[in-house]
Image (cartoon, rainbow, N blue to C red):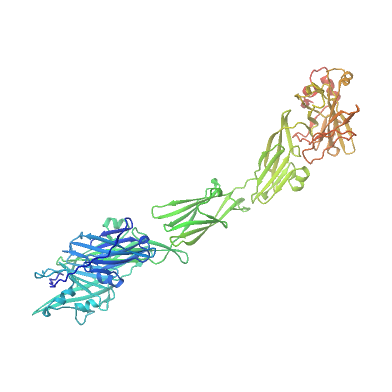
Amino acid sequence: MAFGVCFCVAVLQFAWFPAKSENVPEGVHQMECYDRYFMIAVDLSFTGEEPRFEAVDGTGVYPITEQYSAECGYTVSVLPLPGHVELRASYLSCHADNNDDEVFTFNFNLIANHEGKEITYALNKTCSPSLPWSPREVTCETNYMEVSVRSEVACPSGTNGDDSIADKSAQASATSDWQVMFQRAGEKLIPMNLSEARNQRYVFDLTDRRLVFRTPYGQADSFSEEVNGVPVEVVHATLFSRQSWVVLMVDLVAACSMHEGSYDDHGYMKWQTPEVLHPLVSGLNETRVTLGLNGELLEQPVAEERGYIVERHNATVEISIPYNAEGGYRKSFVTGGLREFYIFNLYLEQTLVDEDDAETRMRLHRTLATPLLLRPVFTVNRTILEEQMFTIYLGDIPEDIELAAVQLNGQEFSVPFTNASGCAVTKVVHPNNTHGYTLKVPFNDSYIIHQFSKEDESMKHTLDINYTLTILPENEPYYHLASVMALTDVSPPEFGAVCSESGIRFKLDHRPFDYMWYINIGSELLTPELAAQHGYIMSNDSQSLLLEVPLFTYGYEYKDFALKGFLGTFEILVRDHETSEVQSSAVKTCPFTSTELIVCSTDGRMTVVANLSLAIPSGGSPARTNLIDMYCGPKEADDTSALFSFLLNSCGSTVKLGKETVTYQNEILYSKKHHSVSKAASEEITDRVTVQCTYPLAGLHRLFSTYRFESDSAGIGSIIHTMPSTAGAPGPQVPTTKPTTVLQTTPATKTPNPTPVAFQPAFHPPARYVKVPAFNRFRGMIKGAGETLQTSVNAANI
C-alpha cells in the first residue's frame, strides 16, 4: 500500500571541515555496492583487534557506536572466521548523501590501531541501486528494522525534502504538527511528537521520494507474536498530521521473523519465516523467495546446485542449507573431542504482490550457526604386504587443522620426517576444502613391534600411532590414536658377510622371532663357549650378532690352491628350533693370500705352500725341489715358493705313532742335479724343509692299514725350516710364522739353535671317505714315469 505524504521544512546549512586522514592500502579492504546497501570489509590483520568507524557528512563526524548504528542504519560486525571487520550501510542511512533516491554517496572514517597508535583512514564510495524501488520495502537487519514507503505528494516549492522529519516538524506550523502513535497488540499508545520519538531511538526521515521509518530491535513499543508457530517482532507506527479539517495518516509496520534457525539430523541448517508477517499485508496474489549468502543473492540454478532448499509448509517459508554448503564459514574446536560449527550469513529477499499488484519487497540478514558438531577424523589401513611397509591414511582433516607431530609406538617425530628416519608423511589435498595425510613406515623400522603368532604361524607387526593435530590459529592440540597390525610369513635369519685379509666377518641383525632357529657351525651350536674354543671373535647384543672367523679356524673349506692364493669358504647353518632341520645357510667364499700354508685334510691329503727362499742356494729354483721321494715334485713354483699336494702315505712320508696322536712327516729337499739314483741325489741335498700332519688317534677309523684313511677331524700341520747350524750341524729354526688362530698346533721339537716354525691350522674338505692305496702299490704304478706322483695317480680310481 502507498500513501501520499508531504513534509515542509526549512534548511539550516553550515560548513564543516574534516580532519586529515590516510588512504587505506590496496589489498586489505573491499568496498561493494549491493541492491539496497553499501558494504566495506577490511582485514583484521590491518585494523587491529578493535577497529572503529565514523560516518562523515556535511554536518560533522559521527562515531558509529552500537546504539547509533541501530538507529541510523549501520551494521558493524567483526568476523574472525573470514578474518575481517564488516560495515553495512543502508542507502537510506542517516549520513548518506542522497541524490533523488538514485545516487548515494558514502563517506566513512576507519580508525585502526597500529602498534598502539590510532590512525584514521578515509573510505568513500558512490552507489546507485541496481533495482528500482518498490512501493514498500522492509529491511530486517541483524540489529534494526527499516521500512520505507513511496511518497507521491510533492512538497510546496521552497522546501527541501532531504532533512529529517524531526527537523521539519520543528519548523512546521501548529496546525500541521506531525505526531506518531504506536500500536501494540490492539492497544493504542499515547501519541508523541517526532522529537520525543527520536529521543526513544525511533527515526523518521523523508527523502525526495520515500518516507523512512527505522527502529532497533527490542524497543518498548515493539511486540512479539507467533505467526504459524514462527516468532515475529513487530513495530506498528501510525504517523499522522491534522491540517484544518484534514488528517493525513500513514501506517508504517516493520515486522521481521526472529526465528533463530535449527539444525536437523540430516545435516541441514533450517530457518523459517511466515509468508504473511502482519495482517496489514494481506490479499497476497504472489510470493517469491530468493536466497543467498553473505549479502549476495543467488540465481535459482546456483542455489539448487549448492543444495539450498526453499519449501512452503502451511503458509510458512522454510529455508534449508546443507551444513557444509559453499559460502558458509566453519571453525574447529576441541571440547570433549574434535568438534566444529558452521556459520551462515543468510540473505533472503521475499517479494509479496497483493491483489492490486502492489509490490512489497522484504530483505533479511540473519546469522545462523549450527550447534557444536562432532568432527570425525578417521584412519584407513592401506598397507600392501608385498611392499613390506605400513601405509595409513588419516582423513578428512578440515582446512584449519594441520598435522604437527606423530608418535610411533611412543617415539615422537615432528612432521615432516627427516630423511634418515625411513618414514614419510605425504599431504593429500581434496577439492572440498579438506585434506589428509598418508603415513608410510617400513616393517623393518626399529619402532615397529614384532611378535611371532603361533596361532597364525606368522609374524605380527604392530604399530600404535598418536597423531598430534593443531587447530589454527590458536595452535590448540588434538590427539588422534590409531593402531595397525600386519601378518607376514616368517623367514630364517639372513647373515651378511664380508671378506677381510684375516678371515670372514658375519653380521646378523636380530629380529624378535629369531628364537625360532638355531645357529650352527657344522653340527655344533654357536655359543660363546664354542667361539672361544675355536678362536672366533663373537659379540652379541640386543641389536645384532657379529662373528669374525679368522682364517684357518675350524669350519673353513679350502680350494683352488695356487702360489698366488686360494679360496676359503665358511658356512653358517640355520636350523629349525624344533626339528633341527637345516632351513638356510650363509655361505661366504673369499680369496686369501699366504706366503706359507699347510692343510691336513680328513681324507689323508697334505697340501703345502712353503717359502723356500732360505732353503735353496743362490741362483737355485724352487721348481727343482722335491719331497723325500724325488719323483714327487711341486705342482707349482715361482722364484721363492713351491706348492705340493700329496697323499699322507705317499712320496716317502714317515709315520710316527704316539700315545694319542699319529704324525705323517715328509721333507722338501733341493738338489742341484736331478739324479735318478737316490744316493747321488742325497749327496747334492743342501737344505731341508720338514712338513708334517698330526692327527688324534681317537678320531681315526683307518690308519692306512688298508686302502682307506678316515679321520673325524683335520690334522694339525707344521712346516719346519731346518738350516745348517753355525758349527755345521743342522738344527731346527724358530717358527717363521705364528699361528693365525687359537687352535692348538704341534710345534717342532726344540733344539739348542731353534729357527721359526710355521704352524697353519687344518682344512676340512667335504669328503670324509677317500680310498688311498698302500705306498708300495703306487711305486709300481709310477715306475718309469716322468711325472710326479700326485700328477700321475688318480686317487678316485683306486
Residue 28 percent coordinates (x, y) = 33, 57
User: Is residue 53 shown left or right of residue 496?
Assistant: left
Give whichever of 641, 329 is nearer the camera: 641
Q: Is residue 230 visible?
A: no
Instruction: Determine which quarter of the picture holds residue 222.
Output: bottom left
Q: Is residue 14 visible?
A: yes
563 relative to 178, above or below: above
User: Is residue 406 shown left or right of residue 633?
Assistant: left
Residue 403 percent coordinates (x, y) = 48, 56
Instruction: Determine which quarter of the picture holds residue 261.
Output: bottom left
641 relative to 242, above or below: above
Residue at x 66%, y 45% (from the top left corner):
508
143 relative to 527, above or below: below
Residue at x 82%, y 21% (from the top left corner):
631
554 relative to 723, above or below: below
Screen quadrant of the N terminus: bottom left
Residue at x 70%, y 41% (from the top left corner):
572
Residue 425 percent coordinates (x, y) = 50, 51
Residue 179 percent coordinates (x, y) = 17, 78
Screen quadrant of the C terminus: top right
User: Is residue 51 shown left or right of residue 132?
Assistant: right
Instruction: Determine which quarter of the picture holds residue 357.
Output: bottom left
Number of callouts: 0
Residue at x 26%, y 67% (from the top left corner):
55
